Image: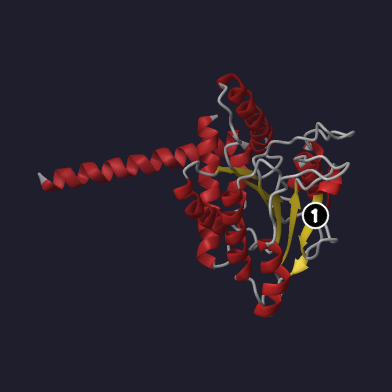
């Protein structure tokens, strides 16, 4: 009886493996996004990182603090590693277009410019940690400078100039430059150009946008957010870009752990973290393909 039970367990396990293998093979030939992730298993370790922080007025202060704390913790692991370079910038400061973008690391006047990881902990504290921790959300407009969320413009600028890097964006992905003379459309061309180098990745950590007491308005707000995500995911399915979206939990008690876990995946430093991150990306892509 025990032998028969073990045989059934073995058979079920074998069938499960066969189904999983068949699913992977099916999507490899039918979904270019899945095929792209499978081809990237042996890619070199990431060493170029671009971090974009949305500081528009709708961003929750506690959420922003969690993100800053965990970004600093990840970048601190690269102290002394001359092969790693990174940039940290904010967008959503008062102003339109590039006026609303500020370079944080390396310096406030160095937008989109990479900085080699410091060799000394003291230098890191002064040039990286203190600068990132000093970031805060923009709450009040300035004279002649409205509060905006120029996500499209920021992505267009970053992606058009970078290749093969990893771009990590903390934002509710709600582009809003309606108060500006010039409005920027979805940066499809820049995304496709960036995505041509398959070693590059776009990672979005996004919260639920601020909602109201009006269900109809909330539906429109969430639809706007999903429209951006769907456009990016369509490009991923077509193999045009490696883009991943991770929704930040609404429960404040779960946010810090989520940030730590996702930023560990997005900015991996050890061999185990790199292997785990690649396996996670592959699984995420297959799950997304199954959901359609």
Quadrant assignment for the C terminus = top right
Secondary structure under badge 1?
strand
Residue sitting at x 86%, y 35%: 180
Task: Return the residue nearer the eye: 265 or 37.
Answer: 265
User: Can residue 182 be seen?
Assistant: yes
Q: Where is residue 51 in the image (x, y as percent from the top left)?
A: 70, 55
- In the picture of the structure, the residue carrying the numbered disc 1 is 102
State which quadrant residue 195 falls in: top right
Left or right placement of residue 67 versus residue 145 in this view: left
Left or right placement of residue 116 versus residue 258 in this view: right
Residue sitting at x 62%, y 31%: 226
Q: Position of residue 27 (x, y in %)?
A: 55, 36
Vertically, is 248 above or below 81? above
Q: Where is residue 142 in the image (x, y as percent from the top left)?
A: 83, 45
Q: How crowded is mark 1: few (under 14 residues within 10 Å), some or many (20 or more)?
A: many
Task: Return the residue nearer the eye: 209 or 79.
Answer: 209
Residue sitting at the far top:
216
Task: Return the residue nearer the eye: 21 or 103.
Answer: 103
Residue sitting at x 51%, y 55%: 261
């Amino acid at each position: 009886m025990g032998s028969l039970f073990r045989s059934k367990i073995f058979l079920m396990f074998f069938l499960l493996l066969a189904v999983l293998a068949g699913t992977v093979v099916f999507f490899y030939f039918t979904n270019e996004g899945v095929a792209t992730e499978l081809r990237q298993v042996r890619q070199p370790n990431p060493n170029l990182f671009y971090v974009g922080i949305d500081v528009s007025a709708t961003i929750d202060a506690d959420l922003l603090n969690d993100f800053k704390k965990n970004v600093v913790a990840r970048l601190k692991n690269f102290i002394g590693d001359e092969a790693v370079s990174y940039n940290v910038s904010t967008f959503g400061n008062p102003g339109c277009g590039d006026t609303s973008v500020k370079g944080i690391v390396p310096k406030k006047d160095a937008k989109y410019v990479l900085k080699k990881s410091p060799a000394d902990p003291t230098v890191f504290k002064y040039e990286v940690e203190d600068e990132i921790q000093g970031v805060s959300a923009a709450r009040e407009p300035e004279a002649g400078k409205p509060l905006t969320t120029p996500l499209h413009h920021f992505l267009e600028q970053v992606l058009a100039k970078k290749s093969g890097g990893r771009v990590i964006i903390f934002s509710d992905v709600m582009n809003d430059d309606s108060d500006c003379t010039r409005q920027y459309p979805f940066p499809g061309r820049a995304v496709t150009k960036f995505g041509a180098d398959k070693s590059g990745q776009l990672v979005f950590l996004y919260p639920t946008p601020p909602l109201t007491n009006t269900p109809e308005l909330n539906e429109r707000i969430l639809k706007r957010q999903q429209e951006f995500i769907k456009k990016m995911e369509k490009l991923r399915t077509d193999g045009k870009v490696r883009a991943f979206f991770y929704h930040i939990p609404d429960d404040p008690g779960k946010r810090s752990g989520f940030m730590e876990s996702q930023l560990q995946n997005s900015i991996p430093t050890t061999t185990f973290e790199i292997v785990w991150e690649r396996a996670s990306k592959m699984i995420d892509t297959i799950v997304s393909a199954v959901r359609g």
